[in-house]
Image (tube, rainbow, N blue to C red):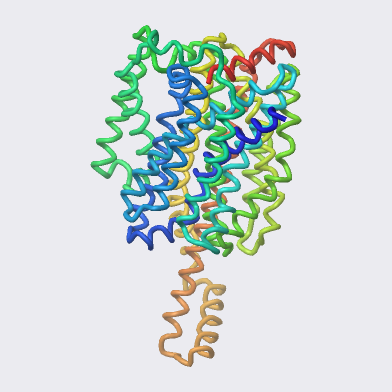
Amino acid sequence: MKKYIIVLTTVSAAVMELLDTTIVNVALNQISGALGATIEDIAWVITSYAIANVIIIPMTGFLGEYFGRKTYYLTSMILFGVASYFCGASETLWELVFWRFIQGIGGGALLSTSQAILFDAFETKERGLASGLFGMGIVLGPTMGPVLGGYIVEHYSWEQIFYVNIPICILASILTILFIDRKVGEGERKDQIRIDYTGIFLLIMGIGSLQYVLEKGESESWFESRQIVIISTMATVGIIGFVWRQFNTDHPVVNLRVFNYKIFALSSIFTLISGFGMFTSVFVYPVMVQRINGFTAYETGLSLAFPTLAAIVLFPVIGKRMGSGASPIPFMATGIFFFILFGFYSGTATPEMGRWDFFPIQICRVLGIAVLQLPLISQAVAGLKPSEYPAGIALTNMIRQLGGAFGIALANNYVTNRAAQHRSDLMSNMSTDNPLFNERIGNAVRNLTTITGDAFNATTMAYKQLEFAVVKQAYYLAYLDTFRLISIFFIIIFPFLFLLRTKKISPEEAAKAAKAAADSH
């Protein structure tokens, strides 16, 4: 019974943290109106959380070792809950942004530390199943965010989006105190651990600035903005300084030497692209179907949730296979194939499609995530020494987050450029020399004259109506191009799979690797 209580505690904590990365997206208009903020400024509610997450994730191994894993986990959970309350109670935009940043600091620990605690609750031979259960949470959280957020916004108020975390945090904290054991010796080496304050500062400056540029670059016109240029310089200096510092200190806050391993370095490329595919697809799809297909926020969430629930059962199965020592390469190849299929299949979508019409397309996306993520994590740490697992796992999580930020930034810019190109191409057909154009305008003028009785302005209204249709079609084509772009990225990295060959490991070695990965947190 204790084992399953720990499953409930850790998976719910991980789901809660990941859910908060997407639940706010569908409520931005309501929050903007309530706090009197512009749409541009309200984006900081998302950006601040993402920046805090990407800063704290690579340090979770070090912080867990310094404070003790249970203490760090419980403190982070309480911090997340307290910050959630103050997010809902915020009366100004910048108050909300501040507490979202604090929420991100607390939430960053919940993901990796939850995985470690969950692994410890299972016997060696069952740790593959533990990976599968945790993988379900990784996918379920971001997918259920729009569903829950849309329902709350439509039936209650935006504050409830944050308050819903509080009872989960209270329950999970109580269960943590009662059922999660301290590891032997944890937190007792604090006096022996030297803190690399310089490395931490450079990490915050470099990764935090990079995340900011990726999140805000499009809205600030990229390098046309003096602010973006300054922060990009800070990111460059911070990252270069951080890398140099970590290779030249005896007590690095993140052990970057793991990149010396060919397998880990190559796996990081796949991790980056998997983050790109996973987060970009979930970002572009809701915007497209709400803007073009006319879905509500709640309908959008449901159209994402049902395919996820249908395919999520694969996670425990794949986890058991990985725990038995199966090679991750065939799984990774299959996952890449489904992502490629998803991108090109999405390109066949039409503006008339309803919620269930997207089900087969979204199934391809979820299958790609399900079959790729767990084997990729296993592959990334396959060549590392046990003492190097903390850095390997932390860096893998950070790289996935950065892949998502990179993907969303690229998607924003790509959609804008492609929409402009498609509009130009479509407008080239709007000529009085084109009989089809003349026929359509003539029909529109007659219909508008009949409806409004205003023959004088009917032609002007007809042209405006046609311009609106052109812009709508241009953006729809741009969204479909973006899905194809996801496929292209996966096609490009596919040949690198043949460089990832590793020796087959026994089930006992696989279990030891899983245990080491858990202990690293």
Q: Is residue 69 or residue 292 the one in the foreground? A: 69
Query: Is the residue 114 above or below the residue 245 in the image?
Result: below
Query: Is the residue 236 above or below the residue 506 in the image?
Result: below
Q: Quadrant of residue 201?
A: top left
Which residue ends up furthest to the front in the rendered image? 178
Q: Quadrant of the N terminus?
A: top right
Count of labels in the image? 0
Which residue ends up furthest to the bottom in the rendered image? 453
Question: Which residue is found at the position 49% from the left and 13% from the top?
Answer: 258
Query: Is the residue 259 above or below the residue 330 in the image?
Result: above
Q: Is residue 165 or residue 141 the one in the foreground? A: 165
Question: Which residue is found at the position 45% from the left and 91% from the top?
Answer: 454
Q: Is residue 25 or residue 275 the one in the foreground? A: 25
Q: In x, y percent, where is residue 354?
A: 66, 61
Relative placement, left or right, of 3 versus 63 is: right
Q: In x, y percent, where is residue 245?
A: 33, 14
| Residue 333 visible (yes or no) | no
| Residue 27 visible (yes or no) | yes
Query: Is the residue 438 above or below the residue 404 in the image?
Result: below
Q: In x, y percent, where is residue 389?
A: 54, 15
Relative placement, left or right, of 104 versus 306 is: left
Question: Which residue is found at the position 43% from the left and 23% from the top?
Answer: 59
